[in-house]
Image (cartoon, helix red, strand yellow):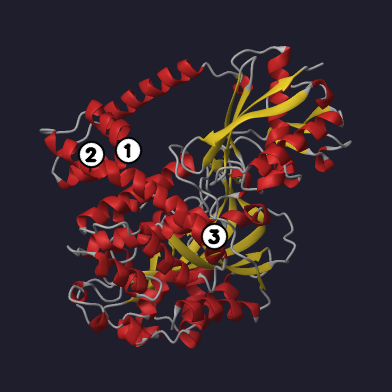
Amino acid sequence: MTSQELRQKYLKFFEDKGHKIIPSASLVPKEDVELAGTQRVLFTTAGMHPLVPYLLGTSHPEGKRLVNVQKCLRTDDIDQVGDSVHNTFFEMLGNWSLGDYGKVEAISWSYDFLINHLKLDAKRLYISVFAGDDDAPFDQESFDIWRKLGMPEDHIFRYGKKDNWWGPVGPSGPCGPDTEMFYDIKPNDPGSLDPSSNSQRFVEIWNDVFMEYDKQKDGSFKPLAQRNVDTGMGLERMLAVLQNAPSSLGPQFCIAERGPHAMALVRGTVYETDVFLPLMKQIEELSANFQDKSARIVADHLRASVFLISDGVIPSNVERGYILRRLIRRLIRHASLLKIEQDFLEDLTKVVVKTYSDFYPKLEEFQESIITELKKEEAKFKKALAQGIHEFEKIGGDISGRDAFNLYQNYGFPIELTVEMALESNKGVDVPGFEKEFKAHQDLSRKAGEKTKGGMTTQSDRTAKLHTATHLLHQALRDVLGDHAHQTGSHITDVRLRFDFTHDAKMTEDQIKKVEDLVNQKIKDNLPVEKVTMPKAAADEIGAIGLFDDKYGDLVNIYFMGAGNPKDAYSKEFCGGPHADSTGSLGKFKIIKEESAGSGVRRIYATISNPN
């Protein structure tokens, strides 16, 4: 069964059970929404993340039964990438009950799909349920349901909270027991039949979570008013089970067709499935020194990078951009271990796009911009990599904090890469020392920048007007270039404003003129500048935008220009002020210069003349 067949079969199965198919959300949570109000997440790490408001009781427009294939990204297991099952990017097949059906339906449908639709061997299926503790009792109901379905009692294991309890995401919130399904991929091997103690033999393939409790801030547990079911099946792991003999995929995926190194690969891993094999084959053909683990790291990180860029993330030194840059630089380093000499990211990206474009057509639409970003990073880091490795090898003994910071500052080595290389060389790294050096560098940069509220070096009537102009500029850029244009920083003096924003190409003269004209028209319209305080969720609903790195509380200040309410205003942004009272006081707006400010970031210098 191919990946496309598995996705469609899963969606159709649950659609026939009354579920509405919903699209995958972006890997970037909308407007950095803090999960359940308790934890900010950089990426969508599970199928339930975009559905948190509905799991908490808000009505979903599609109803109480939902199903989808969700793109996810996790980096907490990045050091394990290269084994048989761990990935950074992955797809999660999930179905949900929002206060509708319960354990009987969820477990019965899981069993039905696995055995009757995927044709797995019921004798190789093993189950775990929550054992119970002082907070919640043994999950007798799930145990009994599995027994009624014919599951032998010696195939059902009882585990505690560590293994069979989901949530809450933060210190409090929805949570509950789960039941997990494992498949025996080595049924003829001797040894333990306990899934928790034999990870080489068992693969976790599905997890049904029953959100029954609300953990209180004092640590106690209360029953939830709305009980939900949240299930997740990892597509890649299930494919590894279904496609454990690669030749079953057809001659294009047959190991015999893979070349001289292929027999060293382990059958039954996620890398021996149709979502990875074309990429692994291409990596092998490019390699002069093929190594299984490095090839897998290149394949995994490249795939994750392609999907991240397609969802609007660009390499940088902060937050999501830093994670992306770390993935790209790590894969380039492992490509060097494979002795891939030529530039390679463009060719490999095309393989990823071809593999996934049937289900994710956006990849093909944005293929050229994805390639552009990757090639920029490839050119930037490959120049420094060899020099950095040479410098690393010159260091005798352990790596000091100063050495690690020099590798970061001079050669672009993320600290995680230095740690990885040190482990391979049996060296230690003074990570706290690095962090101290890094913080000292940040403090110096901060003082040099003299940044204050709103990016202003001074706070005067003129800088307040220039600050107001940045709001108009921000919206005008989005009107002319598209919604991908998003502020990444600003700096305002009494003389001019500087505004940085995401865009991957030099602006044309026509685009610059259109932006100028839009801003000046809004100044001429003399729009009132007003402030309203509202919950962040409400601000998200009306489409308010804000600086990427800002962290907002539950209540936020929205400055809006035009119309009697924020929803219909021309410009509406999260901001702290200060601002002019109206746009008519700004005078004439003029863009002085437009230039590059780094990979995927442009910079505009502008001023206002004759302000009232």
Q: Is residue 502 above or below residue 489?
A: below
| Residue on which the image places disc 2 | 388
> Mark 3 against mark 1, which lies toward the viewer?
3
**In the rendering, at what x and y percent does residue 420 appear?**
24, 45
Q: Quadrant of residue 474?
A: top right
Indicate the secondary structure of the residue bearing disc 2.
helix
Q: Amino acid at mark 1?
A: Gly
Q: Which mark is residue 366?
A: 3
| Residue on which the image places disc 1 | 412
Marks 2/3 in contact by CB < 8 Å: the verdict is no
Marks 2/1 in contact by CB < 8 Å: the verdict is yes
Q: Which one is nearer the viewer's eye here, 419 or 553?
A: 419
**Image mark count:** 3
Residue 128 shows in the view: no
- Label 2 – label 1 distance at C-alpha: 8 Å
Q: Is residue 247 above or below residue 377?
A: below
Marks 3/1 in contact by CB < 8 Å: the verdict is no
N-term mark: 3 or 1: 3
Q: Which one is nearer the viewer's eye here, 572 or 537?
A: 572
N-term mark: 2 or 3: 3
Please tell me how crowded label 3 is: few (under 14), some (14-19), or many (20+) other residues with Cα within 10 Å: some
- Label 2 – label 3 distance at C-alpha: 32 Å
